[in-house]
Amino acid sequence: MKNKEKILKEVSLKDVRIDDQFWNRRLEKNHTVTLKHQYQQLVKTGRLENFKKAAGLETGNFYGMFFNDSDVYKWLEAASYTLANINDLKLSKRVEDVVELLAEAQEDNGYLNTYFILEEPDKKWTNLGMMHELYCAGHLFQAAAANYRATGKRKLLDIACKFADLIDAKFRLSEHKGVPGHEEIELALVELYRVTENDNYLKLSEYFINNRGKHYFKKEVENLSNVAGINFEQNIENFDNFTMSKYYQEFFLDENNKYDGSYAQDHLPVREQNEIKGHAVRAMYLYSAVTDIVLETGEKSLLKALENLWHNMTKKKMYITGGIGSTHDFEGFTENYDLPNKSAYAESCAAVGSIMWNHRLLKLKKDAKFADLIERILYNGLLSGVALSGDKFFYVNPLASDGDHHRKGWFHVSCCPPNIARLLASLQKYIFLQKEKNIFVNLFISSKLNAEIMGHKVTLLQNSNYPWDSTMNYKISLETSFDFKLNIRFPDWADGADVFVNGREQRVKVKNNYLIIDRNWKDNDQLKIVFEMPVKRVKSHPAVKENRNHFALIRGPLVYCLEEVDNNVSLDEIIIPGDSQIKVKYDADLDGFNYLEGKAFTEKHSNWENKLYIEKREVVYEELKFKAVPYYLWDHRDPGQMRVWLREYNK
Amino acid sequence: MKNKEKILKEVSLKDVRIDDQFWNRRLEKNHTVTLKHQYQQLVKTGRLENFKKAAGLETGNFYGMFFNDSDVYKWLEAASYTLANINDLKLSKRVEDVVELLAEAQEDNGYLNTYFILEEPDKKWTNLGMMHELYCAGHLFQAAAANYRATGKRKLLDIACKFADLIDAKFRLSEHKGVPGHEEIELALVELYRVTENDNYLKLSEYFINNRGKHYFKKEVENLSNVAGINFEQNIENFDNFTMSKYYQEFFLDENNKYDGSYAQDHLPVREQNEIKGHAVRAMYLYSAVTDIVLETGEKSLLKALENLWHNMTKKKMYITGGIGSTHDFEGFTENYDLPNKSAYAESCAAVGSIMWNHRLLKLKKDAKFADLIERILYNGLLSGVALSGDKFFYVNPLASDGDHHRKGWFHVSCCPPNIARLLASLQKYIFLQKEKNIFVNLFISSKLNAEIMGHKVTLLQNSNYPWDSTMNYKISLETSFDFKLNIRFPDWADGADVFVNGREQRVKVKNNYLIIDRNWKDNDQLKIVFEMPVKRVKSHPAVKENRNHFALIRGPLVYCLEEVDNNVSLDEIIIPGDSQIKVKYDADLDGFNYLEGKAFTEKHSNWENKLYIEKREVVYEELKFKAVPYYLWDHRDPGQMRVWLREYNK
């Protein structure tokens, strides 16, 4: 399809090697701790056992939440990405064993979902709105595509294709009216299409996207006693007496008990949507898939909707950490500018989803502003989701806390931990893109790229002490000199950039937020870029009520926060002048990090002399120092208050 | 008892006649609309019918809430006060008929409570903690004392005394361990003692106060199946599936299901209490009674507790409107400085109770600061509770609203409407006090006092256009000249006062917040006092989080608020400079009132150009005029937002 000529392209997983001070330890933990810890959880919580039961290797009922298969698939995806560049025989064997188990559990016709196989074999495809049946299939397909790309082995891919063919026959080819309640399969089918080049999968993805907004979920539950899941005893944390009918009423109907559907983005056809609504993770997966379709087909009407939705999300419904989802009630988007801090949801999965969506938009629109956003999410709202130790996770990432929110090893609904794992395991995907004579550098993660441009081999070495320092060094290795363009992202946080080629300062063009260094490159050429990376005081739009008279501190990609452990007074008492100098200092604790230190005040209460309301008073301030640490690091030391938005001193 | 010599004394109800521009219409409405409207409600809602059933005049079960008798008593009290100075034969007959009905319903031994007579005659006195049995008796006694004082008739007083004697025998004389769950009888018994001079009633009141804090309620429910109310189907608004055991658990136990009791001030003996806690109305009635005991006995240990409790309430737990109670959950006090505006409770009954308590403290402590508080509550948090029309009431008086809170004609639990009625009907009580050669003027309500000082007849005429104007005119009429002291409250809102006697400026002493004009008064002497009454911007203690960067506008006794109907932008968008001039203007609407007008700004959002977070920006303001109206008047015009605390402009 001709659209593919215009877009930016990913490089092969194996062609990028990360070697970065900041990320090495994280990725090593992800490999050595997280993947092991999560595998143990899959065993402990019966998730793998469900497959054994479905395969007939063990007896017993399905155990756990009906969508637990998806956690196995996300672990498989994460493990597969890891194997792309790391030779780990034990992990490789473990992956193969799980794939073997899936093969044994898969039914002869290709069907694979252990809940339905074990509990309701006759109720397949009867409750797409609530039972996550197509969602689980989607995670299988994504894992299969990743596994094939990383290892070249076909076994998991074959399982996926067999199931995808069954779903294609059930839905698209027989025009069965239905779409997934929780999107995911749509983007996974495009991935499957990309690795197999089987057009059917792309068409099936389009089929699901084009049928969204037709209120099929309403029809599904017209006779609630016929649908799947009704008699299964669900046991969802924080939902007392969970039943399908309560779930339907609470999430799919409005206050007047009329069908709404925006929870699952089913309120309108996708092409007519322009305000981002409903469950945040679902929205991210859907719009990632829609962007994939545009990447493959160039369809204009979908593109217009995507632009409106992205604009609405990023300008009216996103936390400064990149987090999305303002309410715990339905894990989703609320009104424009409704961004409460303490009760923020900002689910880790939604951060993963938003990175996925923005990565696709970056490829499509070729504008580094999407990479700015990927970076903001990655270093803040996503990275906060996993502890330095690699075995504790946030499901929810608030921007303020009174000290009672902590990372946990696992959750009853445990979508987030393996989602973070697969994102980190595939981090090399997000650094570079390529198109004809152009290499695009989107993230400043020290790494080596082996690329091929117009038949020439190019090795690009990126090196820096980012995010603590903003000098980026590049070394180009070539067999022969030739002309190509290096497009280095000019980040939104940088006030300026000095570009040096082989030590000589250069003036360069900026386009679509990329610095373009276009020259006849020679072997061993050196490129240095020094970005201005000051501490910034950022305000939020005045319609965000909670943040009025407050500001946030950022430096480079990092959002900072105050923690009680570093500051000796209640954080709400700290008032920070709008103009004083803020110093950047180094702390060797917690793998080492830069913190911000500056002058602050607290208002002395003593001059209130037991008054509650008074007219005139001389305000007496006490000076103190505040210490702000990177947001992603919070809740690693003594528990206590945390605030991203800080009171501004106005006098 | 010798203590009585030291305290300030009330004057007879009949010796004060109000004739005041501001209050005349309110009192007339109270007489002609409120009392009629509420009597109709007593009929309509079965409250009077319960007495007929108890008297055997009708058949049927008790109907409504188990404490509904109290509304009849409060109406009787309000009607009785009204009859003190107004000759209304129809009302007088209606009162007599109700009293007659009470006499017929009363059991031979004196017992009177229609719920127990009709529903659980064998369960009397078994559930004092929750069934409001002694509370209802208290309201009967208060009504009886008021009726006797106002009319001189003994019938209601005899009913009350017969019941009080029964309770005295049941409790004090037989040392029965029990106290009321909802206080009220304690202060009512002191009233009964004052009109009858029967010491037993004072001793019974002390008995209840001295036994508080001994956790008797816990013992009562040890065998929950034996107590009253268990099988009666309660139907309380906002309480789904109300049961006694739920009620007990929610209100009397703490989070760990251990007995707490602070909800009903039973956590500690009264003498050991120093932080005001629990249900606000209960607290006010209890501490009113305790103050009454100190007034009668001078007991020091009780006085110390009262001082601590009053200090805690007024300096840490009171809204600027005088309202108290920060949570809907248990209608009560929460943590120090926890004063949310939109979700404020500030129940009208609690305002009545606080006026009652402060009036007693004023008599005891002889300091006009208590009258300052009475005035603040009266003109704001209390008066907001009743519409100008006299037939609609607030139960809850928040300090901010988004337009969904409105006065109603009656409530399922309808304590507030008759409570406001009895307060307004007895308003003359709160203007003057007397002691030996001193007259104390506590409220600036135009009125005539007929007093007797050292055997001399004195008529004091107070006249002003208060609260709109702060010039107070007094005329003294005497038969013969003699020395006495006029003590005029020097209000907390006044920045200064000029005193003129017969047109000549005088220097006077100030003591205990009274201006003391001590002279040989002659017939027709004129006193004029001109108080400085500027508009004031008031801040709240910095620990009140919600009010940071906000201020409230007051002038004289009135707290002002912004209403959406007067201001063309969303009220949260209005920012008011801290230093600009604020004009006082007159509006003839709604019986006429002064409003405040001044310069305000809204921040233009256009310069945000679709940004959600930005570093530097030039703030562009649009200027507008704001209009603030007295708080008591809010929700009389088009529904919409209301705010007492206004955003302060800091630049």
Image (cartoon, coloured by chain):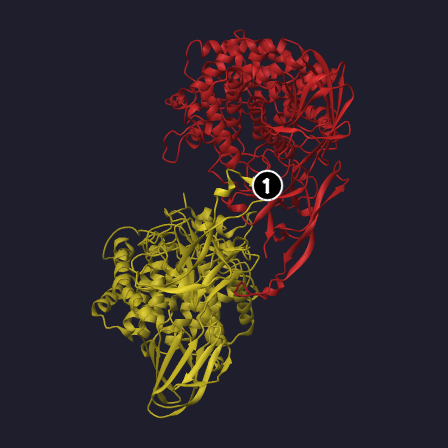
Chain colours: A red, B yellow
Specify the farthest residue to the top: A108
Q: Is residue B453 above or below residue B385?
A: below
In the visual, does A470 lie left or right of B73?
Answer: right
Specify the farthest residue to the left: B90
Q: Residue shown at 26%/72% (left/top)?
A: B86
Q: Is residue A35 above or below residue A610?
A: above
Q: Is residue B111 visible?
A: no
User: Residue A231, how many percent across, how many down?
Assistant: 46, 23
Dot 1: what SS?
loop
Q: Quadrant of the C terminus of chain A?
A: bottom right
In the visual, does B201 lie left or right of A185?
Answer: left
Q: Which residue is mark 1?
A: A399
Residue B392 lies in what quarter of the image? Answer: bottom left
Residue B447 lies in what quarter of the image? Answer: bottom left
Q: Residue shown at 37%/23% (left/top)?
A: A222
| Front-most of residues A131 and B163 | A131
User: Residue B266, how many percent across, how many down?
Assistant: 52, 59
Q: Is residue A18 above or below residue B493?
A: above
| Front-most of residues B260 and A206 | A206
Q: Amino acid at mark 1?
A: Leu
| Front-most of residues A287 and B14 | A287
Chain of residue at mark 1 = A
